[in-house]
Amino acid sequence: MKPEYKVIAAMIEKKTSVLDVGCDDGTLMEFLKKNKEVNIRGIEISKDKVQICISKGLTVIEGNAEVDLKQFPKDSFDYVILGQTLQAFVNPEIVIKELLRVGKKAIVTIPNFGHWKVRFDLLTHGTMPVTKTLPNNWYNTPNIHMCTIKDFVKFSKIVNFKISKSLALKDKKVSNINVSNLFFKNLFAELGIFQIEK
Amino acid sequence: MNNRENIKLLIVKKPLKLDCGLTINDYPLAYETYGSLNEKKDNAILVCHALTGDQFVTGLNPVTNKDGWWSYAVGPDKSINTNKYFVICANVIGGCMGSFGPSHENPETKKIYGTDFPVITINDIVNAQVNLLDHFGIKKLFSVVGGSMGGMQVLQFVSNFPDKTKTAVPIACTSSHSAQNIALNELGRQAITADHNWSNGEYSSKKIIPNKGLAVARMAAHITYLSKKGLQEKFGRKLQERDDLKFGFDADFQIESYLRYQGSVFVDRFDANSYLYITRAMDYFDLVKQYNGNLSDAFKDTKAKFFVISFTSDWLYPTQENKDIVIALNAIGADVGFVEIESDKGHDSFLLDVPDFLKALKNFLDKSYSE
């Protein structure tokens, strides 16, 4: 199980409704169902992953968040989760807006492109960084819109949404991100975990 | 057709008001069951058959002596596991495997109904079938499952009886028959009625059948059940038992021979008038219109858990039409899962050995049952 799953679960109140966008093999869904007794649904683009979810008894829709979130009315869920996939969308702005339309709150995690190893990699090698969290090459990566934690914070002001919680994950350790430590978190965190609202 | 004594019949006493306005009562509903109903009566699955299906879902069909139409999916330890579930399937009214249909005798005229049979709808079919639940003392089904026209019945069933099933699995279907669907059905009907033998539907009194017309209808329909890729891979331009073209109109190509065969075996087992009536029922199916343009309203009273399945190469009931059902369900926060199965086998995929489909169906049912 990915280390951020517990962090995400801690953000979610019991017995609420949750949509996991890009739910993968349903690991997080199962975890939330068991520990938070939530009414949980998933959307997943990969047929194989959908099959795995079905075999776990999870309610999942095969689909693409960029087009298939449209079908959900406003405020359909208490929380909508988007784990490490914002950077893979053609239009992250539309996706964020859709998340906040469909969910009362959204939880978004982003692999931090501002991490010092990433910066160092590009600085010393002069080639696009390949790291543990970003294992693909530039030509075959699904991540077409990489951003840093700082970028995401700036993005919230441009797109006009509220970040109600922001956490940094580094070596499985969680810490708060605030205005004064943003520079360092942006340099050392592997993952940013944000709870956002309209 | 023989061995008709193997058909189980329920004579439905309760009057049924048909959509056309007529009321029928004391009509026969032919059905078959597989597996056994448990003490709690919570393991029943109603399987709804497609256009040319019947109640003999699996095992040997005692009337045709062929395998049941859904033998891949239904049986001991299969997707719809008859060791675990009690499977019920009724022949649709309007059909020709024992249920009240156009080949029955009209008690008033002592003649075969033929085209005097009332035009029935998917709604009528479902309203007739629900009597089987009462017959077996089942308050709530575990699931209602069906593909193609069977899927339409699933949707209609849940909409008519929102509390009578725990889960619903509409497969490769639509909530509203499209212009293309209607056009293809009309082609089949025209082929039948253009056959001189059809005799305005009174062929059976003359002891003849419109075999040519019915065969053409089946051939045309059969093409729509397959995909271009599937046909190309299976037949390509292969020739039928010959080394070269014969410069005539015999079946030079294997695909021609195959279709002719499909047509010829169909006329032995299916009634031409039933074909007219059942295709009409499909064409009239428009759940969207029934709910004044809002499909979601069809499901607003149900707590049933849905699982919608479509196939990539199905151009008769394409994925988008199946997704429209999902969208309508999501719009009201219903519990709905959806998967599009990769398959080259066209619309027929749900009837064939498509492992991803069979696996998904099994997993959905077994997991939902244990919940």
Image: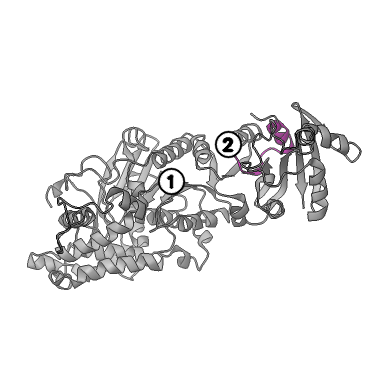
**Same chain for the residues at labels 2 and 1, yes or no?**
no
Q: Is residue A15 magenta?
A: yes
How packed mark 2 is, by other alpha carbons closer than 10 Å (few <14, some 14-19, many 20 or more), is many
Q: Which residue is mark 1?
A: B342
Q: Quadrant of residue B121?
A: bottom left
Spot occupied by residue A147 in the image (x, y as percentages of width and height): 75, 44
Determine whether, in the image, residue A125 is placed left or right of residue B258: right
The Cα–Cα distance between marks 2 and 1, rounded to whole angstroms, is 21 Å
Spot occupied by residue B367 in the image (x, y as percentages of width and height): 47, 35
Residue B51, above or below B22:
above
In this rendered view, identify the residue nearer to me: A13 or A85.
A85
SS at mark 1 in the image = loop
Q: What is the image's colouring?
A: one colour
Q: Which residue is mark 2?
A: A26
Spot occupied by residue B30 in the image (x, y as percentages of width and height): 24, 51
Q: Which residues are magenta?
A: A4-24
Q: Quadrant of residue B191?
A: bottom left
Determine whether, in the image, residue B132 is placed left or right of residue B319: left
Spot occupied by residue B271 in the image (x, y as percentages of width and height): 19, 60
In this rendered view, identify the residue nearer to me: A2 or B131.
A2
Q: The disc labelled 2 sits on which kind of residue?
A: Gly
Q: Residue at x 28, y 42 (%)?
A: B33
In this rendered view, identify the residue nearer to me: B187 or B327.
B187
The subunit carrying tag 1 is B
Q: Can residue B119 be seen in this snapshot?
A: no
Q: The disc labelled 1 sits on which kind of residue?
A: Glu
